[in-house]
Amino acid sequence: MTPEIDDYFAVLKSEHGADSLARVEEMLEPRRRSDQRHPLQQAAKWVLPGIPQQPWHDPYAYPELQPLVTALEENHAQIKAEQELAWEQRRAAFSDYEHYLVRQRNWQALYLYRDGALNEEAAATAPTAYKVLKEHAVDTDVICPLLESHFSTLLPGAAIKPHCDLWNFSINLHLAVDIPEGAAIRVAEETRSWEEGKCLLFDYSFEHEAWNDGDRTRTCLLADLWHPDTTLPERAALTMLMNEIQKMMAG
């Protein structure tokens, strides 16, 4: 770790207790054994110990996330109508999705939140989704500032190859906006279909893939949220840590 990270961790521990960052520090141990991970988590870069090794989660089970899940589902019809209008009339607002592993033209994204802030242009393009996300994820600090929220549109025939995302301390929420027959997602060893107007929640440090074998686009609204089993000091430490690592890699 760098002196800046050490100093910030020291401040957090002085405020929240000497053991408040024990799991983060354990995660950083170079001798940490990979066999502590689930076999289908092996490709994830960072695995915070103590997070349940559970691929799928009940989106209604966490009080912290419940207001966001409820608001998304209650506003589904308007969110869908605005997304469809944007897809028809403002296609330039969408871009090829750039996953850290791949960029795909048949996987289009309209960003609502990115680089630690709301995308102000989305307030006009997708006002209902923007408002719900701001009120129930950004203003409440349940969104992970290291990641993003976007409309994810898979074109007919598109597939996302099996992969693990970078870490397990955030969790992925999907609102099923427009779902054709033939679209599905596999996380770990279980495959599910989206139910239009409902949310799915899963730990994407586990191997997962998705596909659209339907005859029209498949769209979900995705949000990267803090895993409910992380603490506030851990979230602060992880945000600072990962931002510093990104700076070092960029330099």
Image (cartoon, rainbow, N blue to C red):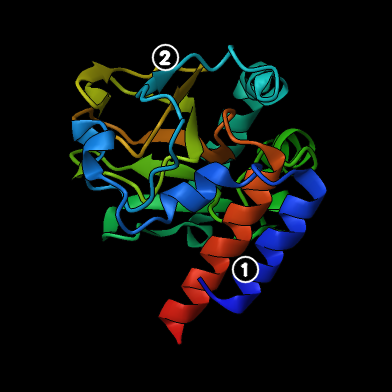
Q: Name the side, left or right, on which 71 lies relative to 150.
A: right
> Observer-nearest residue: 106 or 68?
68
Residue drawn at x 74%, y 54% as measured from the top left = 12
In primary-sequence order, the first of circles 1 and 2 is: 1
The quarter holding residue 250 reads bottom left
Q: Name the side, left or right, on which 6 lies relative to 44.
A: right
Residue closest to the far front:
18
Are circles 1 and 2 on residues that touch, CB within 8 Å? no
**Secondary structure under badge 2?**
loop
**Label 1 neighbour load within 10 Å: few <14, some 14-19, many 20+:** few
What's under tag 2, amino acid-wise?
Answer: Glu
> Observer-nearest residue: 101 or 40?
40
The quarter holding residue 190 reads top left
Residue drawn at x 35%, y 24% as measured from the top left = 55
The quarter holding residue 214 reads top left
Residue drawn at x 42%, y 35% as measured from the top left = 219
What's under tag 1, amino acid-wise?
Answer: Asp
Q: Position of residue 84 (x, y in %)?
A: 52, 37
Residue drawn at x 46%, y 24% as measured from the top left = 201
Q: Is residue 68 above or below residue 157?
A: above
Can you see residue 212?
Answer: no
Q: Which residue is mark 1?
A: 6
Label 1 or label 2, whichever lies nearer to me, is: 1
Q: Name the side, left or right, on which 37 lies relative to 80.
A: left
Q: Is residue 32 above or below residue 57?
A: below
Q: Which residue is mark 2?
A: 195
Q: Position of residue 242 (x, y in %)?
A: 52, 62
Q: Position of residue 251 (x, y in %)?
A: 45, 87
